[in-house]
Amino acid sequence: MNRSAPRPAAARSGHRRCGGRASVAGRWGAGALVAAAVTLPVASYATHGGDEPVVEPGEVVVVPSGHLDLGPRMESGTWELRVRDDRDHPPVWRDLEDVVVHVVDDALVPVPGAAEYAFLGLPEGSPVHVIPQVEQEGVVWVGWNTQAPEVVDRLERGADLSLTRVEGPGAVHLFLQEGVSSEPLVLWSSTTDLPQSAWMEVNTHTHANWVFTRPGAYLLGLESTGTLVDGTPVRAGATLRVAVGDEVDPADLLEQELGEAPGDAAAAGDAGGAPEPTAPGAGTSDGPGADAAGLLPWLGVAAALTVAVALLVARRGRRARALAERDQAPEVAR
């Protein structure tokens, strides 16, 4: 199948398209999370320059703020999962094993009371640390992309970024919010079976909300998979280290590795991160305007982005059908 062949249309049941105009909502209180729904035209691609350097392994950095992107690169013909550090000029690519993401307490927000956020498993108002969908000053901003030049040249259609393992004191959730009236699209949740995957077209870049339900040290097993234009399957894994909270020493995570015993991720998810049992109805609110008030900390004013956000698909058992639709598409010469 040529990469230039028509792509399957976004299905209501399993596909979400990020394309259109930015959605605007209001802030809620001082210091509230600015995590807006941002949608840009699919055609506005911005491939990274080919001269971005790769840092030699062993140069350790702790990142409490600024822009990072997870993403695949082709290094001497080998598919690798790295992190693009956009705090430097020009940006540099780093080994994930040398990076600790520090989510500081400025990233704390209360859980909304709207029923759409019941998947977080916490009572309304519970404090959680959030890496936001849109950049917030003083808080690290982590996205992912498929824009490295050789990846753009050689990748067929797109790639999956999968969460394979989680070790930490609470649950981890990744969700995308398309607008103030849209329900959250949950991409990953450690409270359900792993692995879980999010698919992205080649030459695109996006951000979502990363929720950590308890402070502490987290190790996230990640895997990037795809197929090259010559039909070769590619796969690479790495560990994302995340220190959550001001009281956590990021340096401690450098000595930690994901364990080999199965079930660790499920155990972390079962904890749910709830500080206390959820009271009946705690995750919902039926009062006038209650849902809107709960949404506002999570949906602020959309920031102006200089990156393209295109097609993003959460795979939840419907991927097989999507692939079948793709294979039935007519061939078009490149």
Image: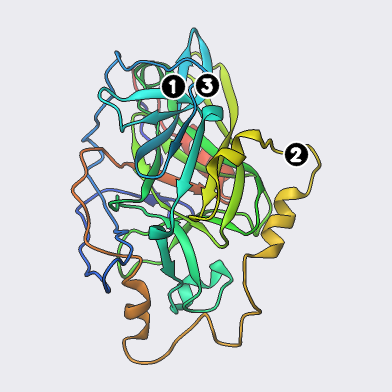
Q: For numbered disc 2, what is the local secondary structure?
A: loop
Q: Is residue 1 visible?
A: no
Which residue is label 1 attached to?
A: 155
Category of crowding for the residue at label 3, using alpha-carbon neighbours closer than 10 angstroms: few (below 14), some (14–19), many (at least 20): many
Q: What residue type is labelled 3?
A: Glu
Please state the horizontal and vertical placement of residue 59, each as a whole percent of the image.
48, 22
Marks 2/1: CA–CA distance: 31 Å
Which residue sits furthest bottom?
287
Viewer-nearest of discs 3 and 1: 3
Residue 211: where, in percent of width, then height?
49, 58
Residue at the top extreme of this rendering = 76
Observer able to see residue 123:
yes
Compared with 151, 18 (above or below) is below
Residue 19 in picture, x, y percent from top left: 27, 48
Q: Name the residue under label 2.
A: 259
Q: Earlier in the sequence, mark 3 or mark 1?
A: 3
Coordinates of residue 161 in the picture (x, y in percent): 52, 37
Label ID, residue 80: 3
Specify the quadrant of the image occupied by residue 262. top right
Distance of mark 3 from mark 1, alpha carbons? 13 Å
Distance of label 3 from label 2 (alpha carbons): 21 Å
Seen from the viewer's position, the closer of residues 17 and 1 is 17
